[in-house]
Amino acid sequence: MIRDHDRVVLTVPLSDHALEPSEVGVVVHIYPRHKAYEVEFVTLAGQTAAIVTASADQIRPIGFDFRDKLPPSDNTCNVQIARFCNRDQASRDLGVGCI
């Protein structure tokens, strides 16, 4: 579940704001029932590029839990990947192996 101040990745282009898929932003407000989010996108210099209202299907969290996305399986490789991606805060924060 996406929470306030989580970093998220844009999954679709938002041409009105000159934003492309894979842009990273920070959630600054959550609308009721998590239907939409206010997300701030910044430049590399730290200046606000845009603040947009994004629907839940237009963004995804960075370092999401693969275990929520994997179907039940006896394939232990998938389970090991999920464990690696959620092993520690650093891998979640950086999205190492999880984006």
Image: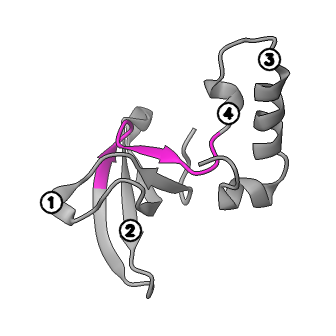
Could you say where residue 56 lies in the image, as x and y percent from the top left?
A: 39, 38
- Magenta residues span 53-64
Q: Decide if residue 93 is in sight here.
A: yes
Are dots 2 and 3 in contact, CB under 8 Å?
Answer: no
Q: Is residue 31 above or below residue 47?
A: above
Residue bearing the label numbered 1: 16
**Amino acid under disc 1:** Asp
Would you say 94 lies left or right of 34 here?
right
* CA separation in Å, label 4 and label 2: 25 Å
| Mark 1 or 3, closer to the camera | 3
Is disc 2 surrounded by few (<14), some (14 to 19) or many (20+) residues within 10 Å? many
Residue bearing the label numbered 3: 75
Q: Residue at x 44, y 88 (%)?
A: 45
Q: Nearer the viewer, residue 81 or 32?
A: 81
| Mark 2 or 3, closer to the camera | 3
Q: Looking at the rendered structure, which numbered label has been put on residue 72?
A: none
Is disc 3 surrounded by few (<14), some (14 to 19) or many (20+) residues within 10 Å? few
**Amino acid under disc 4:** Phe
* CA separation in Å, label 1 and label 2: 13 Å
